[in-house]
Amino acid sequence: MRAYLLASVLILVVFGSISTYLYQRFSALAAMDFSPPPVAVNSEVAQATMFQRTVKTVGTVRSLQSSVLAAEVSGRVLNIAVTGGQTAQAGDVLIQLDDRIEQAELARYRADMRLAGTLLTRDRALAAEQAISQTALDTAIASFEVAQAQVNETLARIEQKRIVAPFSGTVGVPTVNEGDYVSAGMPLIQIADTTKAEVAFSLPIDSAQLITIGNPLIVQSSSDGATLEGVVTESDPMLNAQDRTRRFRASLATATVLPGEFVRVVLPLDTPESTVTVSETAITYALQGAAVYVIDDSQTPPVAQLRMVTVGDTQEGRVEVVRGLKIGETVVSAGQHKLFSGAQVVINEDSPL
């Protein structure tokens, strides 16, 4: 009996010791703080900024006057009077087609016209003396007019053999050589007035409705970043059936960009107004939309809370926040990739993240 009592006491003592040990260990673990340490981030304060609302697109520079000159009639190239890049004045002959047959015909028709003119002068003198009939005089007049018409027709055909500059400008590289045979409608040479330029661009319907004739714009060159000012001068009355956009043209103040150059176009819509802005790095984009981490510094340490916002235009590295943020609120500007909503943060402005 005593052995059983002794064994029971020993068992109670062993299990009591184990229970006491386990209780102390779990109590110590429960008292420990397993929350993650505060995340080091950079911050900034949402500011009130004068913001200019704009419409942005891309366009192509065009010469205010440019033309591809084509052959009106078939013939062989007799002479090319210019070289690519040369300046030509309005009326200058650029390319001459072989017109020797027409010149010979012109000489013959002019001789016929002189003879018809001489006969007409004589018949008029005779008619004044009533020496010939009115029918004979009418025939002489008709003969002279026919000869004159033949001369004019030949002069017109000769003119078709001359490719003339329709305006002053710079000519391009000819597409033919002397001696080549060209057919009617074949392009021969291009001419453009590079002293004046315009930009052509298209806008979708929602933006096109905001732009009117006379709207100022700023053009930025894609090559060197130079900016030019201009004004909208033309627009289509309807949308393009293929892409549902409306075409616009704007004249530029100076022509320091080359025709055909790709440019960025910015069209201001109204006067600048004050709006809430943050730096571009403060915006986090997700499937749900744009968001910012707003820092609640009423707690110790501060806590970052994720907040969905509605953003607008972007200018000079700052983003317009249309809805969801107030002026003076502190947001995380760098280090968001380490955050989650409710995470504790420590502001570290000394080193960029």
Image (cartoon, rainbow, N blue to C red):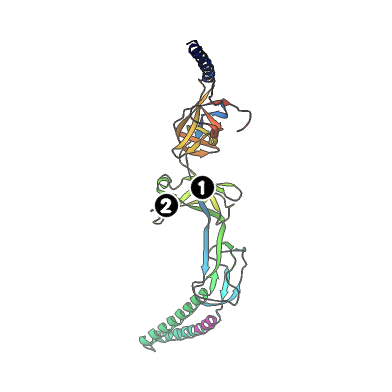
What kind of element bears circle 1?
strand
- Residue 169: x, y in percent? 57, 61
The relative height of residue 196 versus residue 95 in the rendered view (above or below) is above
Res 51 seen here: no
Q: Amino acid at mark 1?
A: Val
The relative height of residue 114 versus residue 278 in the rendered view (above or below) is below
Q: Write down the residue under mark 2.
A: 246
The relative height of residue 195 versus residue 149 in the rendered view (above or below) is above
Write the residue at 48% across / 35% down. 320
Our reading of the magenta stretch's main secondary structure is helix
Q: In the image, 82: left or right of 235?
A: right
Q: Residue 172 appears in which quarter of the rendering?
A: bottom right
Write the residue at 63% across / 28% down. 350
Q: Residue 87 appears in which quarter of the rendering?
A: bottom right
Q: Residues within 10 Å of mark 1 (few under 14, many from 20)?
A: many
Magenta segment boundaries in residue numbering = 101-109
- Name, please, the residue furthest toward the front: 1
- Name, please, the residue furthest toward the bottom: 131
Res 216 seen here: yes
Mark toward the start of the polypeptide (2 vs 1)? 2
Q: Give me the C-alpha separation between circle 2 and circle 1.
A: 15 Å
**Residue 102 inside the magenta-drawn segment:** yes
Disc on res. 265: 1
- Residue 44: x, y in percent? 55, 29
What kind of element bears circle 2?
strand
- Residue 11: x, y in percent? 50, 16
- Residue 269: x, y in percent? 46, 41
| Tally of numbered discs | 2
Frontmost residue, 177 versus 245:
245
**Residue 327 inside the magenta-drawn segment:** no
Discs 2, 1 touching: Cβ within 8 Å:
no
